[in-house]
Image (spheres, rainbow, N blue to C red):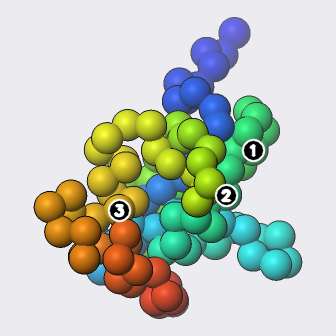
Amino acid sequence: MAAAPKRPPLPAILLANDLLDGDVVFASVTAAGALAWTRDPTLALLAADDAAAARLEAYAVSEFAAQHVVDAYLVDVSIEAGGPVPRHYRERMKTLGPSNRPDLGKQAGDGIAAERRA
């Protein structure tokens, strides 16, 4: 009997670091239904069940193998007005930016519009 994969509580999002510039990226879905990376945390694809979580984990494995991202993992989130918000402080900081400089980072909109380079 195979052991169930260890996952954070659901709902969860997949975050990683872009291998080219190190910026935090989030798995999202394109209009065609394919998975892609975005720098905007409000567009992160939410995994609400085990099938969706498994799809995100498979995407993380394939993107790591293709050397597009590193350190990809699921993060449990709560749903708030602006979108998914990580429950753990470490991941919340990754989605916002420096706590002592609210004028920098994703909380200030820095880098969100940047497209991932191929």
Mark 2 packing: few (<14 Cα in 10 Å), some, or many (20+)? many
Looking at the rendered structure, the kind of residue marked 2 is Leu
Mark sitting on residue 45: 2
Mark 1 packing: few (<14 Cα in 10 Å), some, or many (20+)? some
Q: CA distance from mark 3 to mark 1?
A: 25 Å
Residue 15 in picture, x, y percent from top left: 48, 56
Helix, strand or loop at label 3? It is helix
Examine the rendering and report whether any part of residue 118 can be seen: yes
Foreground mark, 3 or 1, reads 3
Q: Earlier in the sequence, mark 2 or mark 1?
A: 2
Foreground mark, 2 or 1, reads 2
Foreground mark, 3 or 2, reads 3
Residue 19 in picture, x, y percent from top left: 35, 73
Residue 60 in picture, x, y percent from top left: 55, 55
Helix, strand or loop at label 2? It is loop
Q: Tell me which residue sits at (37%, 72%) in the image.
A: 106
Looking at the rendered structure, the kind of residue marked 1 is Ala
Looking at the rendered structure, the kind of residue marked 3 is Leu
Q: Tell me which residue sits at (39%, 60%) in the image.
A: 95
Mark sitting on residue 32: none
Tell me whether circle 2 and circle 1 mark residues in contact (CB < 8 Å).
yes
Name the residue tied to disc 1: 52
Residue 6, above or below 86: above
Name the residue tied to disc 3: 96
Residue 53 in picture, x, y percent from top left: 67, 41
Helix, strand or loop at label 1? It is helix
